[in-house]
Image: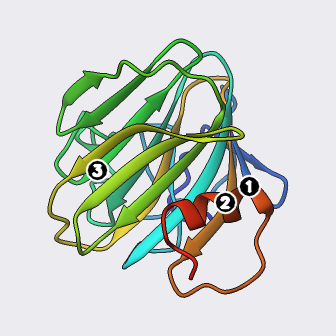
Amino acid sequence: LTLDLNTVNKYLHLSESNRVITATKTVQSYPDHPDRFDVYPQVLCRESVCGRCYWELEWSGNNGVRISVSYKSISRKGGVECLFGTNDQSWSLFCSPSRYSFIHNEIQTALPVKPISNIIGVYVDHSAGTLSFYSITDTVSLIHTVQTTFTQPLYPGIWVNNESSVKLCKLIRMHCKKKIRKKTEKVAHYLDLVP
């Protein structure tokens, strides 16, 4: 995954070749851009999700993050309607050390699964309308799955609360045959992504 640098909110600090996103109280010197999220500390990735895709992110911090997918048409300049999960354009898993919750169209659903890992796997089958979140340890544990209808391409998105951070990991598409790390390979086979 790679970040769309034109969307990064000015309160997000990027490091490790733009692979790590950390929320900060210090304004970053990003140029003005119509695609940039003005209010909320969030960012979209450049890659669209079509077909069947799987990716992983590793989060840290006590204040929570939102692991999201969003249509590119989400608002960038405005209030709460721009926040991942508070509109019909985006779907979010909120992760904190104490809880998970799923948020879509301003409806937040507390999930019974307790956080046991800081690595989250996200699986999308765009044509089938499936979105699933997994907790990745030595095993693969389902956190939540959604069945819906996606009407536009999806883009991975990340919202990061103050002093929390997210690290981007590998994106796997169904046709990808490149060598991938063992843990991700196991998950990909589990999801039948790699033949």
Q: In this figure, which colouring scheme has been used for the structure?
A: rainbow
* Percent of width and height locating residue 68: 42, 47
Q: Residues within 10 Å of mark 2 (few under 14, many from 20)?
A: some
User: Does residue 130 sit above or below 63 in this rendering?
Assistant: below
Residue positioned 64% across, 55% down in the render: 30
Q: Nearer the viewer, mark 1 or mark 3?
A: 1
Circle 1 residue: 183
Q: Are marks 2 and 1 in contact (CB under 8 Å)?
A: yes
- Residue 127 lies left or right of residue 175; in this view the side is left
Circle 2 residue: 186
Residue positioned 51% across, 73% down in the render: 193
Secondary element at image label 3: strand
Q: Quadrant of residue 195?
A: bottom right
Q: Nearer the viewer, residue 33 or 113?
A: 113
State the CA–CA distance, disc 1 to disc 3.
28 Å
Image quarter of the N terminus: bottom right
Mark 3 or mark 2, which is nearer the start of the sequence? Answer: 3
* Percent of width and height locating residue 162: 61, 23
Circle 3 residue: 90
Say which amino acid is labelled 1.
Lys
Can see residue 172?
yes
State the CA–CA distance, disc 2 to disc 1.
5 Å
- Residue 184 lies left or right of residue 129; in this view the side is right
